[in-house]
Image: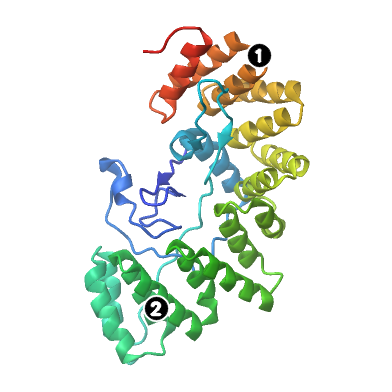
Amino acid sequence: MNAPEAVTCPTCGARNRPSWEYCARCDAPLDAARPAASRGVPRLRVQPAEGLATGSSADSTGILVVTVLAFTVLSIFAYRSASDADPIAGPDPRMFTIGSQPVDLPEAPPPTQPGAADYAAGRRLMTAGDPAAAVDALRAAVAADPGSAAYRSALAHALWRAGDREQAVAEHGDAARLDPRLKIQYARTLELAGHPEEAARQYEALLADNPDSPTVREELGRLLYRSGHYADSAPHLQVAVASRPDDAVLRQELAYALDQGGDREQAATAYREVLERAPDAVIARALLAENLFGRGQQAEAMTLLEAGLQRTPDAPLLHRELGSLLERSQRPEEAVAAYRSYVQLAPNTPDAAAIQKRVAKLEGVRPR
């Protein structure tokens, strides 16, 4: 089976499945992020009103974790910079979730419904990649039927793609008031527009009505996670994981939230559960090694990385993490070898120059 390649959003950095034309997180067009040969005619894709539930099977989740994380890790990871005196730090992921597939806008209503023709025209213009023109058509549809949540939601998406984000937020709010099922979309749009506190309040209001909703818990958990409030995000992500126990990517997010929130032992358990489902998930393996090393289990951390390299010898991240642990274990010669393997496998990675500088320092050679 050929490995699927994720498409990294040029706007927010989220990874999306190859067939998607718009980012599942920020709704930005993805065509420019693809190789020229693979670009196709844009299709109408918008974010789901019901949140980020992937609905993927255990097998498809495993494939995504194994292949996407293994082969695209370098383009979606940010690494902490180290000074000349400090060892290279371990991985610091900011986002490694593949969002759910955005859904199509509702089909055109019956021709007898007010605004139906304008709505259909707006859909066609969105599909054709002309959101500015779509805004005019969809405004006409809303004017003809102000009580249609579908019209307002479509107008909000067109406004967003046309660059009028604050007006898009307002329209999403109006759509959510007309149809409560769109409240999650409104909350997500608030966050993307730079209003995370208001987004959190919207999620909390939804939870007040339905405290056991795994979808809302997941959305709020991810908002807190992206905001760096890891300890607060973990309980919500735990509820989401319980609803989708075979979603290894979601479980990895939970593990990292637990880790950064201070519950390192439970985080290690969660990382191991990821590896049980997807043994070649190199990010989870590297993060678990970092976790073990930090808790004084250096030998187990090394063994874990060595086992991973036996399975996936060409995984750059494992070489990088092994070099970091070796350096911190006062084994500079072995660290240099691991770092060199990393740079050889990933010469264009953003931190290649920093790693090469570190190698030169460890070898006692003045960098050029």
Residue visible at 56% across and 59% down? Answer: 223
Q: How crowded is the residue under tag 1: few (<14 C-alpha within 10 Å), some, or many (20+)?
A: few
The type of residue carrying mark 2 is Glu
Decide if residue 13 is on the left or right side of residue 203: left
Q: Which mark is residue 241?
A: none
Q: Is residue 195 left or right of residue 331?
A: left
The answer to which of 360 and 72 lies nearer the viewer is: 360
One can see residue 346 in this view: no
Percent of width and height locating residue 123:
30, 73
Gap between marks 2 and 1 measured at Cα: 58 Å
Q: Secondary structure at mark 2?
A: helix
Q: In the image, is residue 16 above or below residue 79?
A: below
Q: Amino acid at mark 1?
A: Gln
Front residue of 258 and 132: 258
Tag 1 secondary structure: loop
Q: Which residue is mark 1?
A: 330
Residue 140 position in % (x across, y down): 27, 85
Q: Which residue is mark 2?
A: 171
- Picture coordinates of residue 139 (x, y %)? 29, 82
